Amino acid sequence: MSFQLPNLSYDHSALEPHIDSKTMQIHHGKHHAGYTNKLNAAINGTDLASKSIEEILKSLDMNNTAVRNNGGGYYNHCLFWEIIGPNCGGNPTGDLARSIDKNFGSFEEFKSIFSSAAGTRFGSGWAWLCADSDGSLEVCSTANQDNPLMPGECGKTPILGLDVWEHAYYLNYQNRRPDYVNAFFNIINWDAVTAKYKEATS
Ligand code: MN3
């Protein structure tokens, strides 16, 4: 079995002005496609080829750089496209909103902690909101294409992730990563995040 680049459920231009069309074309069609192809090449003919991406990442040999970088890149971007969308943003509701209040104090406090994690990740990486099976939440960040499922990371289930590689924002924002992080909150698909939260805690 090989991994497939998922189609986007919205047009490249649908996230403007927050993420520009050209960035979406290159990010999905070149970067994510590249991780997908290189992951398939790295696992072809090995016993990893029959596993799910989550299984591969949870039992990853961190010295296997081809699978670490490209398996992480494949999974991270699949999640990213799912949790953003047009006509989104606003605040979460229901159990997820209650857990955010309980774990961080308020939605505004969560936003500040998450934005700080995204802003202070040096170089390339990701900021995450992760859920534990008991419903608790935590914010973390990882370098490069690492993610919370990998050995040595928080081990909880990522339900929201923000790509802070320059390839995710440089055409529109140049060095202004904080502006990109602020804009991200206008395109978060909280229904999709809530579905992931339910799955992680069921
Ligand atoms: Mn990326």
Image: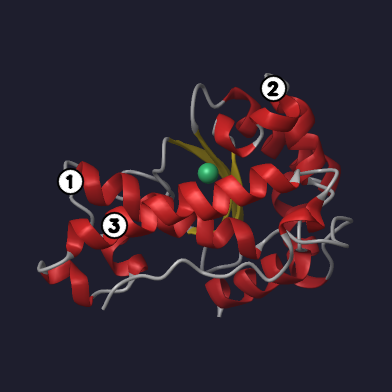
Measured along the vertical axis of the image, is residue 136 above or below residue 50?
A: above
Instruction: Give the amino acid at mark 3.
Output: Leu
88 horizontally vs 19: left or right: right
- Judge whether residue 112 can be spotted in this image: no
Mark 1 C-beta closer than 8 Å to ligand 1:
no
Marks 2 & 3, CB-CB < 8 Å contact: no
Instruction: Give the amino acid at mark 1.
Output: Asn
Secondary structure of residue under mark 2 = loop
Q: Nearer the viewer, mark 1 or mark 2?
A: 2
| CA separation in Å, label 1 and label 2 | 32 Å
Q: Mark 2 or mark 3: which comes first in sequence?
A: 3
Residue at 44% over, 56% down: 33
The image shows residue 156 at horizontal and vertical percentages of 46, 57
Residue at 55% over, 61% down: 79
Q: Nearer the viewer, residue 33 or 46?
A: 33
Residue at 33% over, 55% down: 71
106 horizontally vs 197: left or right: right
Q: Furthest residue to the top?
A: 175
Q: For residue 7, which quarter of the picture?
A: bottom right
Q: Nearer the viewer, residue 111 or 3?
A: 3
Number of numbered callouts drawn: 3
Measured along the vertical axis of the image, is residue 40 above or below residue 140?
A: below
Can you tell which mark lies on residue 64? 1
Can you tell which mark lies on residue 174? 2
| CA separation in Å, label 2 and label 3 | 29 Å
Disc 2 packing (10 Å; few <14; some 14–19; many ≥20): few
Disc 3 packing (10 Å; few <14; some 14–19; many ≥20): many
Instruction: Give the amino acid at mark 2.
Output: Gln
Q: Mark 3 or mark 1: which comes first in sequence?
A: 3
